[in-house]
Image (cartoon, rainbow, N blue to C red):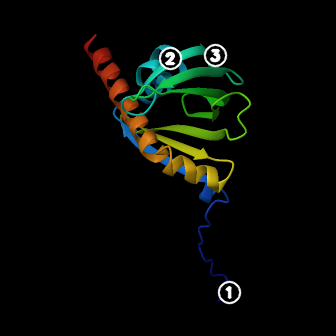
Amino acid sequence: MTGARRETRAEPATADREIVISRVIDAPRELVFEAFTEVRHLSRWWGPEGFTTTTRSFEFREGGEWDFVLHGPDGTDYSEWIRWLRIAPPERIALLHGESRDDPNAFESVLTFAPDGAATRIVMRTVFPTKELRDEAVEKYHAIEGGQQTLSSLAAYVTDLARKGAEG
């Protein structure tokens, strides 16, 4: 059949190395984005349920770094490090995340912040260096549940901020 076009949707080349998590948050996009840009916000919500965060150093700019420790509910400390790769306020943040600056297993995440009516849809797309590292993150470190819990903590935090702002 000449002239007919078949629509095909190919899987991205990174599909077997990706984790994609999204959530709609009942707060304006600028506020949700700001919660990622200031350490006073991040330390209040970052991490899965039961975890707390201690920041060693923080510089939110392209090429800047966030060096921090996640404290697990069982008392285990996890050294973490993020380099901010690209920042396009209030739409997008790309970052490299590992245990330390020289971590060969560091992974890249891109966060997008899109208006969804009066709310914000945040999508966190993480690409690991290999399928094996992705599978390990999912199975051993419960990365999908942890990511969902982290976005849930973010949602609760910024929804509360938005409510307080509306009252104040």
The amino acid on which the numbered mark 1 sits, given as a three-letter code, is Thr
The residue most toward the top is 168
Using a 10 Å C-alpha cutoff, classify the residue at mark 3 as few (fewer than 14 neighbours), some (14 to 19) or many (20 or more).
some
Say what secondary structure mark 3 lies in.
Answer: loop
Query: How far apart are the two marked residues, 1 and 2, measured between alpha carbons?
Result: 63 Å
Residue 134 in the image, given as x and y percentages of width and height: 59, 51
Rendering coords of residue 126 (x, y %): 58, 44
Residue located at (47% from left, 13% from top): 40
Viewer-side label of 1, 2: 2
Q: Which residue is mark 3?
A: 59
Residue 93 relative to residue 167: left or right: right
State the image coordinates of residue 63 (x, y, percent, origin top left).
Answer: 72, 24
Q: Are marks 2 and 3 in contact (CB under 8 Å)?
A: no
Q: Which residue is mark 1?
A: 2
Query: To which quarter of the image does residue 8 belong?
Result: bottom right
Residue of label 2:
54
Q: Secondary structure at mark 1?
A: loop
* Circle 3 or circle 1, nearest the eye: 3
Name the residue type under label 3: Glu
Work out whether 24 lies above or below 63: below
Q: Earlier in the sequence, mark 3 or mark 1?
A: 1
Work out how far the residue at label 2 is from the one at label 3, CA to CA, in angstroms.
14 Å
Residue lying at 28% horizontally and 21% vertically, measured from the top left:
163
The crowding category of the residue bearing disc 2, from other C-alpha atoms within 10 Å (few below 14, some 14 to 19, many at least 20), is some
Quarter of the image with the C terminus in it: top left
